[in-house]
Amino acid sequence: MNLHPMQMDLKGKNFRDWLKDYSNGSTVEQSELDAGRYYPRVWRTAPELETHGDPILRVEDTQEFDTFVNALEQIEGLCEDLLYVFRVVHPAMDGNLNAYGGAIRDVIILACTEVEAQWRGVLEAHSVTPEGNYYNTQDYVKLLPALKLNEYAVKSIRYPSLKAIAPFRGWAASDPTKSLNWYSAYNKVKHDREMAFSEASLIRAIEVVAGCVVMLAAQFGVQALERHHFKSLFEITERPKWEPKQWYYQPIPGEKWSGERCPI
């Protein structure tokens, strides 16, 4: 229920008391943001609202739409690259997932740089500066609670024998690089291919492309991907449950959506 005190007769009561009466004693909580306010590139709503098509924030109505489309196209390209690898090395669970090679390494490096671009984009959208001279995982891991990245999981659409992947589960601020297996592998093969070539394995490529898909959904919502016919090898099977007070609510008539800085 999205109500604004300027639009109703409070019958001499303050708004909170009036709302308690109006809601027949149901629990009343104040939302974290006013109606029409949202955190750019931080998707927070209930899956039920998306599923049933209730009025929610649409990326098309925000200033981030061009950013979304650009990211969508980049990640679709990564999915195509991974599919090409699958035509050479089938993603079977019988040992193929440990196969490694130059084409797989290329996918890992490209996909990880895209994840880094997404991480940095969200931080910059909320004026979060790096702790050192450059952004690194010590900065990026701050997005874990803000986006609830660890609560997302995906499943392969074409290859159901592959287990579900939660690419950010286990990510820890105490060791933000090594606690992400695919990111740790990326660092090793990027800096020392001769000694760490076997780290460029098929399973790591799958995990990092899945991470790109999760980052896209965590910023702009699953429904946005569906509306734009996102060509992905993965479908989102698990996503966060945000509390109603954390949802974004429609602007009052005559006003537009307005972004606010998220406390990251």
Image (cartoon, helix red, strand yellow):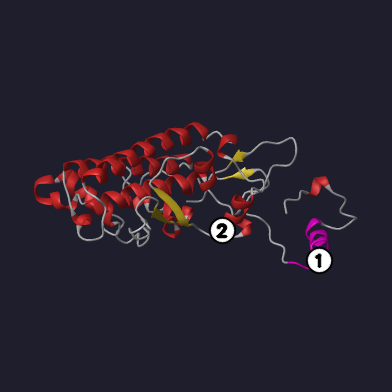
Q: CA distance from mark 2 to mark 1?
A: 24 Å
Magenta region, mostly helix, strand or loop? helix
SS for callout 2? loop
10 Å crowding of disc 2: few (<14), some (14-19), many (20+): some
Outermost bottom residue: 25
| Foreground residue among 216 and 119 | 216
Q: Position of residue 195 (x, y in %)?
A: 9, 50
Which of the labelled discs sits on residue 242, or is there none?
A: 2
Q: Are marks 2 and 1 in contact (CB under 8 Å)?
A: no
Left or right position of 237 against 25: left
Q: Which residues are magenta?
A: 15-26
> Is residue 138 shown in magenta?
no
Where disc 1 sits, the SS reads: loop
Residue 111, given in percent of the width and then of the height, sits at: 31, 42
Residue lying at the far right in this picture: please name it: 11
Quadrant of the frame with the N terminus = bottom right
Numbered circles on residues, count:
2
Identify the amino acid type marked 1. Asn
Residue nearer the viewer, 139 or 57: 57
Q: Is any part of residue 170 visible from this angle?
A: yes
* The stretch drawn in magenta includes residue 25: yes
Say which residue label 1 marks: 24
Q: From the top left corner, tell me how far across and down residue 220 is, in percent.
A: 51, 44
Q: Nearer the viewer, residue 33 or 26?
A: 26
| Along the line of sight, the residue nearer the viewer: 226 or 11 | 226
Residue 124 in picture, x, y percent from top left: 43, 40
Describe residue 74's horizontal placement relative to residue 94 as left or right: right
Residue at 75% x, 38% y is: 253
User: Which residue is at 61% across, 56% downward?
Assistant: 48
